[in-house]
Image (cartoon, rainbow, N blue to C red):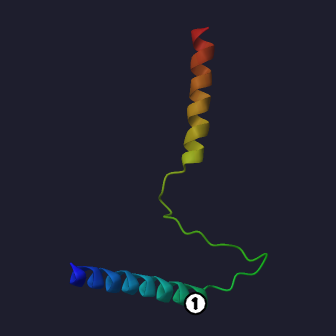
């Protein structure tokens, strides 16, 4: 049982050390963001536009209400 506790202690220490190493890597390699610089978000050109779909759905629901009345 003592050996298992020792190995568990080493494993937790290794995980903590790995986490700190990843954190240091992220801090030192971060992109230089400046106020006013645009953030580029890339998306597939053929991806559907869900906001346009919402407008079409609302328009169709409104026309359904006026026809039913």
**Quadrant of the rendering where the N terminus is positioned:** bottom left
Q: Residues within 10 Å of mark 1 (few under 14, many from 20)?
A: few
Residue 26 or 50: which is nearer the viewer?
26
Name which residue lies at 37% across and 80% down. 12
Asked where in the image residue 18 lies, by quadrant, the reply is bottom left
* SS label for mark 1: loop
Residue 54 in the image, given as x and y percentages of width and height: 58, 39
Q: Position of residue 8 (x, y in %)?
A: 30, 80
Q: For the point 55% across and 41% down, which residue is it? A: 53
Q: Residue at x 62, y 8 (%)?
A: 69
User: Relative to 18, does residue 67 appear above or below in the rendering?
Assistant: above
Judging by the rendered image, the residue that carries numbered circle 1 is: 29
Of 63 and 39, the residue lying toward us: 39
- Find the residue positioned furthest to the top: 69
Residue 62: quarter of image: top right
Between 7 and 61, the one lying in front of the other is 7
Indicate whether 58 appears above or below 3.
Answer: above
Residue 34 lies, in percent from the top left, at 75, 81
């Amino acid at each position: 049982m003592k050996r298992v506790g020792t190995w568990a202690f080493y494993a937790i220490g290794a995980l903590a050390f790995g986490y700190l190493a990843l954190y240091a890597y992220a801090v030192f390699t971060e992109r230089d963001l400046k106020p006013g610089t645009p953030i580029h978000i890339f998306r597939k050109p053929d991806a559907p536009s869900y906001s346009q779909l919402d407008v079409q759905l609302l328009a169709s629901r409104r026309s359904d209400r006026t026809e039913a009345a």
